[in-house]
């Protein structure tokens, strides 16, 4: 009896010791894995949400950031994305966590936005401290362009334009696939719309069959080419996006049209394909948004055009145009792609320029 009692006591002591040891281990481990350290950007984001009267996970809440593209003290910034998600409730899956590409530099930007109010707070964080700036992005608040673009975020208005143009597209409900094009390009401008309209037109009118692939000669080369990379999966590195600068003013095409490139829908097994000279019906775009704009337009004009174009993204078929179709042999394909060859001269759509 005594032996059994001692064994029972010893067993209970062992269990108790193991339980206490487990609790002690859990307490020691808890600060590491169970309780996240306070993020250095937490206060900045919470203050921004308070200024904008936004609740975590709210329908009007959106976040734009260059996290994962920039570095702070030579360290990458991907981990700040988790902080942003936890603090705001925004996510890529919900379509309200947006990114934009910038060269690595010691400046993390986080823009917290209120969609229905068309307001945002820009947070700039250098790794140790941050600063914030409130912006109202209604058309009426952008009238004094010199003040807005040059004094809002610093000496240069370029960064302000990048932020405002992207957030404006989100305000207007641009689809996430379009925002991915913008992420790579880093801002919104008429050219990225031209690339979007052209890509969507290609996918609808010239879908790939088994054994086929796209080769696109991006000529003239402009902002539109970044949309080709995102929507068509083409890149210069894979040698299926060939970038060739030409003087677009000299290309022979229908009046009111704007050349965007030359598509080759190529069959490897047949060693032949279909060639298509692509363009955008520029006059139709201007008619749709009821305004004219161009390369030398002001930032306000470009922003206004972009805002209006965002409302017409689903109407790409009205703007996508084909100048001509032709048969492509292996020899012609190689010549069109060859460095130093002007593809429009080769197709008889442009005169040879003699130096």
Image (cartoon, rainbow, N blue to C red):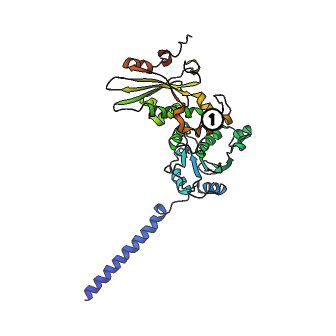
Crowding at mark 1 (Cα within 10 Å: few <14, some 14-19, many 20+): some
Q: Quadrant of residue 233?
A: top left
Please name the residue that numbered disc 1 is placed on. Answer: 289
Q: Is residue 37 above or below residue 224?
A: below
**Residue 249 drawn at (x, y percent):** 59, 20
The quarter of the image holding the C terminus is top right
Q: Is residue 326 left or right of residue 296?
A: left
Closest to the observer: 4 or 163? 163
**Residue 280 drawn at (x, y percent):** 54, 28
Closest to the observer: 58 or 45? 58
Q: Is residue 32 left or right of residue 281?
A: left
Instruction: Kindly tell me whether residue 333 is visible in this rendering.
Output: no
Q: Is residue 78 above or below residue 87?
A: above
Closest to the observer: 33 or 268? 268
Instruction: Kindly tell me whether residue 105 is visible in this rendering.
Output: yes
**SS state under label 1:** helix
Q: Residue furthest bottom?
A: 1
The quarter of the image holding the N terminus is bottom left
Q: Is residue 190 above or below residue 60?
A: above
Q: Residue at x 64, y 39 (%)?
A: 161
Q: Residue at x 55, y 43 (%)?
A: 174
Q: Residue at x 43, y 68 (%)?
A: 26
Q: Is residue 6 left or right of residue 189?
A: left
Number of numbered discs on residues: 1
Closest to the observer: 233 or 321? 321
Q: Is residue 163 left or right of residue 91?
A: right
Q: Quadrant of residue 14?
A: bottom left
**Residue 256 drawn at (x, y percent):** 59, 24
Q: Is residue 339 above or below residue 149?
A: above
């Amino acid at each position: 009896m005594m032996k059994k009692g001692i064994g029972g006591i010893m067993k209970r002591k062992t269990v108790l010791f193991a339980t206490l040891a487990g609790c002690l281990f859990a307490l020691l481990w808890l600060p590491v894995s169970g309780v996240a350290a306070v993020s250095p950007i937490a206060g900045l984001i919470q203050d921004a949400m308070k200024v904008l009267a936004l609740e975590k996970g709210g329908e009007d809440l959106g976040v734009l950031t260059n996290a994962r593209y920039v570095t702070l003290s030579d360290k990458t910034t991907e981990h700040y994305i988790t902080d942003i998600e936890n603090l705001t409730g925004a996510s890529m899956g919900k379509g309200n966590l947006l990114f934009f590409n910038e060269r690595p530099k010691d400046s993390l930007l986080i823009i917290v936005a209120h969609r229905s109010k068309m307001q945002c707070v820009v947070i700039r964080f250098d790794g140790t401290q941050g600063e914030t700036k409130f912006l109202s992005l209604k058309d009426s608040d952008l009238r004094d362009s010199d003040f807005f673009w040059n004094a809002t975020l610093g000496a240069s208005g370029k960064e302000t334009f990048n932020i405002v143009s992207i957030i404006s597209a989100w305000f207007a409900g641009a689809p996430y696939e379009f925002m991915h094009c913008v992420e790579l390009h880093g801002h919104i401008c008429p050219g990225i719309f031209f690339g979007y309209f052209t890509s969507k037109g290609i996918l609808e009118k010239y879908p790939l069959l088994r054994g086929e692939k796209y080769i696109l000669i991006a000529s003239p080369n402009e902002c539109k080419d970044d949309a080709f990379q995102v929507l068509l999966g083409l890149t210069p590195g894979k040698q299926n996006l060939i970038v060739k600068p030409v003087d677009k003013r000299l290309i022979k095409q229908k009046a009111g049209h704007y050349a965007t490139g030359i598509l080759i829908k190529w069959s490897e097994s047949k060693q032949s394909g279909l060639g298509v000279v692509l363009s955008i019906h520029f006059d139709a775009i201007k008619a749709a948004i009821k305004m004219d704009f161009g390369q030398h337009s002001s930032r306000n004009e470009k922003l206004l055009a972009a805002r209006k174009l965002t409302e017409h993204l689903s109407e790409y078929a009205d703007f996508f145009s084909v100048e001509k179709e032709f048969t492509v042999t292996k020899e012609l394909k190689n010549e069109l792609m060859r460095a130093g060859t002007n593809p429009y001269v080769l197709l008889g759509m442009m005169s040879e320029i003699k130096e």
